[in-house]
Amino acid sequence: MVFQPNERLHLGAEAEVWSGLWMGRQAVRKIRRKRGWRHPNLEKRLGFRRLLSEARLLIRARRVGLEVPAIWDVDLEKGILIMEMLPGRPLIELLRDEKSTQDMIRNSLYNSGALVRRLHRLAITHGDLSTNNILIDDDLSAHLVDFGLASIDYEVERFGIDLHVIDEILGASHPSIEGGIDIFLEGYLDEESRLGPAKEQTGGVVPSADAVMKRLEQVRSRVRYHG
Ligand SMILES: Nc1ncnc2c1ncn2[C@@H]1O[C@H](COP(=O)(O)OP(=O)(O)OP(=O)(O)O)[C@@H](O)[C@H]1O
Ligand SMILES: [Mg+2]
């Protein structure tokens, strides 16, 4: 099906992302860019695997109602994903916008934490939890994009690392937002209290929100100690 491009949203080292129309609907096309320095066959296999994994995990999360884009088409040969265009703007913009009120910031961070916990309860770690990959809509609901580094996991480490990545980013790129990470973590923990213990997944039981928080503390002290 033909995608009619409208505007380039992002040109990164790994991907080129366009908004446009697909079957008359607002859509996003993500093209995985070729990295010249790798062997072409290896390149193809790695690209295949990552694109397939990105599509699979997005579909898995979306199926149970998480706020992630629906996948509409995948072309593994060309390295293309066509997906639903989500409303909202990246959290990074909202945090940097002088017009954002404390309440807006608080709600966005809280809702982001809650959504990340719901993702973790599916045994999915995001792998790149930056304020660029969280979109906030007009209702201040959070949505997650960019599952290129996401994976299925049951060991607590990667869950802790997810929280540590956003912890570092909120501290480093947004130092003016005091205690931002605490609001995010409050949302993360409250979501677990609200929903009860996570249901067992096909591969076992995911670490509890408390266990992931403890691991975050350990990762923080590891980083402090080793620099
Ligand atoms: N479904 C979507 N709806 C709305 N905006 C999107 C969607 N997917 C991506 N975007 C926007 O495009 C940006 C880049 O997309 P994405 O994060 O998936 O690429 P990327 O893998 O980070 O690329 P690179 O690693 O090369 O920087 C996102 O930060 C977001 O602002
Ligand atoms: Mg991204």
Image: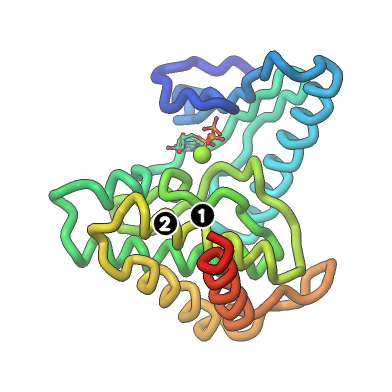
The reply to whether residue 188 is visible in this rendering is yes
Q: Residue furthest front?
A: 226
Kind of residue indicated by mark 2: Ala
* Number of the label disc, if any, that sits on residue 160: none
State the CA–CA distance, disc 2 to disc 1.
7 Å
The x, y position of residue 184, in whole percent, is 41, 68
Displayed quadrant of residue 72: top right
* Disc 1, SS: loop
* Number of the label disc, if any, that sits on residue 142: 2
Residue to which mark 1 is pinned: 67
Residue shown at 30% from the left, 54% from the top:
174
The mark total stands at 2
Q: Are marks 2 and 1 in contact (CB under 8 Å)?
A: yes
Residue shown at 44% from the left, 42% from the top:
86
Residue shown at 34% from the left, 50% from the top:
173
Q: Residues within 10 Å of mark 1 (few under 14, many from 20)?
A: many
Q: Residues within 10 Å of mark 2 (few under 14, many from 20)?
A: many
* Disc 2, SS: strand
Vertical relation: 90 (above or below) 46: below
The x, y position of residue 203, in whole percent, is 84, 67
Kind of residue indicated by mark 1: Glu
